[in-house]
Image (cartoon, rainbow, N blue to C red):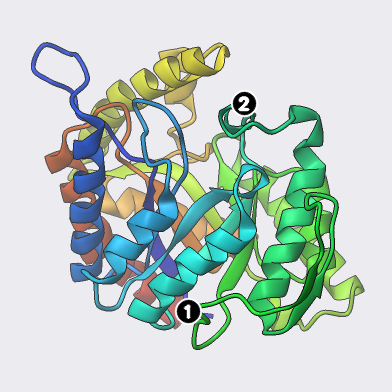
């Protein structure tokens, strides 16, 4: 597989000069500008995440993917993730099949349960049904993606489907990844369903996450799936600037603010600045530094994990759009060419 590099975003509501937050509408426009630039500088994938917070307001990732599908030419687009437990799998499929009609072969889906239960009261679901809803809706999503004339029943629906075809149909089935934060149950589920695994990572070490990759591939082989289809992608926090010092100072300021405010909205404690800064080094899983530093660290992780794609969340905590765009430019023009060159000769 060709190694792919990209970016993902949950939206980044800008800061006004007085420190207050600007309009969430601007965050939508900013992410479309960023996707267009990522396409222009040769990045492979842009993922649109789902959050429902003032600071990170991309609550409808499929809408953003559709908008981006008509303004880009080669970059792959997808949700990262769709919180499937509290969404409708048929509507998710229809919306992304629409995008795939506009950008054939370039639209994917990462289906996850969600890192919190914030969407359950919002969409009137019972938190006790957390896993049932995800498992049932994922099964239905896979069924409608696989083909026409679907007959299906599951616990999240009162009425079964009888010989139903969901339109529009993409010209080829959407690639569906199983999104997980590293739960062993999710690893097993990905293998049982024959799905590629998309790891969302906020902490730990490269060696820790390599173990998940080994467990996934071992279980995949035991299940008898074709070895070449055991695909792993990684989503991490990270930022690229001209120098290591510049990257660390810019990202720490904004990432710590994002985590403090986001965790407060969820009622959870945030890590200290010092604790978070400690994850920025080579032994951690936050990829912050110069183009050379980021290249070396991605190659190191690839050597351990063997993943086919890595995407970075750079626009955090009201980071100015110019900083985000410059990071995308460096990722596409400095980091990706060197990664490709190194892997071609290894």
- Give 141 or 38, whichever is nearer the viewer: 141
Name the outermost residue toward the right. Answer: 222
Q: Where is residue 330 in the image (x, y as percent from the top left)?
A: 21, 56
Q: In which quarter of the image is the N terminus?
A: bottom right
Q: In this view, does 326 lie to the left or right of 168?
A: left
Task: Please tell me whether mark 1 sits on a helix, a strand or a loop.
Answer: loop
The residue at the point 39 percent across, 80 percent down is 101
> Compared with residue 256, is residue 204 higher up or lower down, i.e. above or below?
below
Q: Position of residue 273 (x, y in %)?
A: 41, 15
Task: Please tell me whether mark 2 sits on a helix, a strand or a loop.
Answer: helix
Dot 2: few (<14), some (14–19), or many (≥20) neighbours within 10 Å?
A: few
Is residue 342 visible in this depiction of the protein?
no
Q: Quadrant of residue 314?
A: top left
Q: In this view, does 114 lie to the left or right of 105?
A: right
Q: In which quarter of the image is residue 99?
A: bottom left
Distance from the alpha carbon under mark 1 to that under mark 2: 41 Å
Name the outermost residue toward the left. Answer: 17
- Give 123 or 28, whichever is nearer the viewer: 123
Dot 1: few (<14), some (14–19), or many (≥20) neighbours within 10 Å?
A: few
Q: Name the residue under label 1.
A: 2
Q: Name the residue under label 2.
A: 121
Q: In this view, does 125 lie to the left or right of 223?
A: left
């Amino acid at each position: 597989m060709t190694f792919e590099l990209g970016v993902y975003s949950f939206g980044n509501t800008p800061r006004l000069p007085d420190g207050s937050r600007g309009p969430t509408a601007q965050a939508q426009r900013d992410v479309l500008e960023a996707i267009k630039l990522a396409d222009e500088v040769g990045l492979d994938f842009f993922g649109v995440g789902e959050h429902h917070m003032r600071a990170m307001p991309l609550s409808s990732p499929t809408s953003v993917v559709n908008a981006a599908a008509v303004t880009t030419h080669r970059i792959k687009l997808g949700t990262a993730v769709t919180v499937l437990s509290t969404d409708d799998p048929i509507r998710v499929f229809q919306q992304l099949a629409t995008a795939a009609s506009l950008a054939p072969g370039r639209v994917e889906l990462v289906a996850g349960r969600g890192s919190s239960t914030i969407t359950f009261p919002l969409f009137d679901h019972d938190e006790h049904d957390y896993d049932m809803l995800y498992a049932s809706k994922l099964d239905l999503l896979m069924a409608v993606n696989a083909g026409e004339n679907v007959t299906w029943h599951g616990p999240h629906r009162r009425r079964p489907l009888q010989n139903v075809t969901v339109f529009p149909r993409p010209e080829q089935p959407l690639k569906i990844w199983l999104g997980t934060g590293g739960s062993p149950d999710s690893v097993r589920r990905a293998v049982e369903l024959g799905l590629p695994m998309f790891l969302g990572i906020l902490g730990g070490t490269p060696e820790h996450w390599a173990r998940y990759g080994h467990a996934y591939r071992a279980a995949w082989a035991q299940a008898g799936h074709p070895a070449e289809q055991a695909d792993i992608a990684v989503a991490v926090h990270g930022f690229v600037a001209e120098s290591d010092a510049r990257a660390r100072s810019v990202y720490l300021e904004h990432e710590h603010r994002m985590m403090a405010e986001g965790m407060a909205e969820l009622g959870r404690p945030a890590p200290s600045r010092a604790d978070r800064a400690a994850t920025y080094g080579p032994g951690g899983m936050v990829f912050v530094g110069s183009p050379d530093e980021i290249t070396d660290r991605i190659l190191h992780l690839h050597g351990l994990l063997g993943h086919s794609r890595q995407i970075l969340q750079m626009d955090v905590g009201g980071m100015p759009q110019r900083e985000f765009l410059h990071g995308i430019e460096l990722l596409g023009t400095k980091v990706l060419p060197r990664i490709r060159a190194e892997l071609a000769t290894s």
